[in-house]
Image: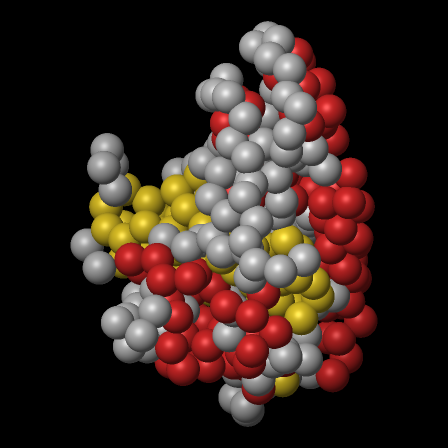
Amino acid sequence: MGIRPSSLLIHDTFSGNEFEDILEEKNVVRINTVTEYVPNEDSYNINEKCLSKIGDIWISYIILNKGSEVYLVNELIFYYSNKDSRPEIDELFITLSECIVDYDNDNFDKINILSVNNNILELEPISYDSKVDIDIMYNSDTIKSINKLIKKIKINKSGLSIFHGERGLGKTNMCKYLSSKIDRISVFIPTNMIDMSINNPEFKNFIKKYDKCLLIIDDCEFLYNPVYGKVNYFTNSILQLVDGFISEHIDLQILLIFNNDEIDEIDENLLGSNNLLGSIEFDYLEGDSATILSKNIGNNRKYKDSTKLNDVFKNKKNDKKIEFGLK
């Protein structure tokens, strides 16, 4: 280029097929491509780092999983040395914006689980296809809280959300439902991968590849057990991603799931986060609601008392919630 060029970084994620078709129509010249082959169980995931040129404009971008039918493009950067090229770049971006990924589109794998293969982090898609109306699976106040949280996640660039309650109340299922209703790619992180992801300073570089992301971490109560010994480390890592300097550069939401019903058992530093969007407690399904759900799924059991959601699906007898202490 002769002189140090100006650059324009675009943070959106694009549909790969449409993106490359547009460049071809603009008579793009391919300058260089670096290909990465990441082995998986059956074959390889193919990622490419591309450098191309249209007239006086240089274009750098990354193609993720090129072998997929719906592969993605991100980390798009325009380089230019002539200020007169800026209107042309703006016009090109307007055209490319037509293929910005809409994660409300069912063609994309919106819900994924984080895995590792040959020490390389990967995303594996998981399905969510509930055959039961979500409104009859939870108490009405829970549904109202979830709908409010969905709206907050949609309008906020970064934030922290918390689900808590006993096991068997449908928290994980609700995470999948929530993921299907927002315009973000969702990534479930197993607790055994915390050190390779949340607690790893380099993880932010991995997650930047997936613009507008929701991280979901289950079984978080184990991370606060004194035996685990990494209480402050995990909390600090979470807060850095949603409250700290890093949060200003990543469009990221985090949802933590705790399998306990006492809010004071959750780290107060998380509850005091400046970007806490909501903390939702899951409770036993009310008797009338449990009866309606049981009829809907074909079990036809009548429930007089509040019951765990999981027990209704298993067609078990009432699992009464026993309270101790003074009232």
Q: Residue at x 31, y 59 (%)?
A: 193
Q: Is residue 110 above or below residue 134?
A: below
Question: Horizontal and vertical percent for residue 299?
Answer: 57, 10
In percent of width and height, residue 273 lies at 63, 78
Report whether residue 214 is seen: no
Q: Quadrant of residue 28?
A: bottom right
Q: Residue at image x 43%, y 61%?
A: 220
Image coordinates for residue 13, horizontal then vertical, percent: 60, 55
236 and 180: which one is in front?
236
- Specify whether residue 90 is in view: yes
- The answer to whether 220 is drawn above or below residue 239 in the figure is above
The quarter of the picture where residue 326 lies is: bottom right
**Does 127 sit left or right of 134 as displayed?**
left
Q: Is residue 234 above or below residue 151?
A: below
Q: Residue furthest front?
A: 326
Which residue is rendered at x = 24% and y = 51% of the image? 117
Compare residues 95 and 215 and report the one nearer the observer: 215
Quarter holding the C terminus is bottom right
Q: Nearer the viewer, residue 137 or 66?
A: 137
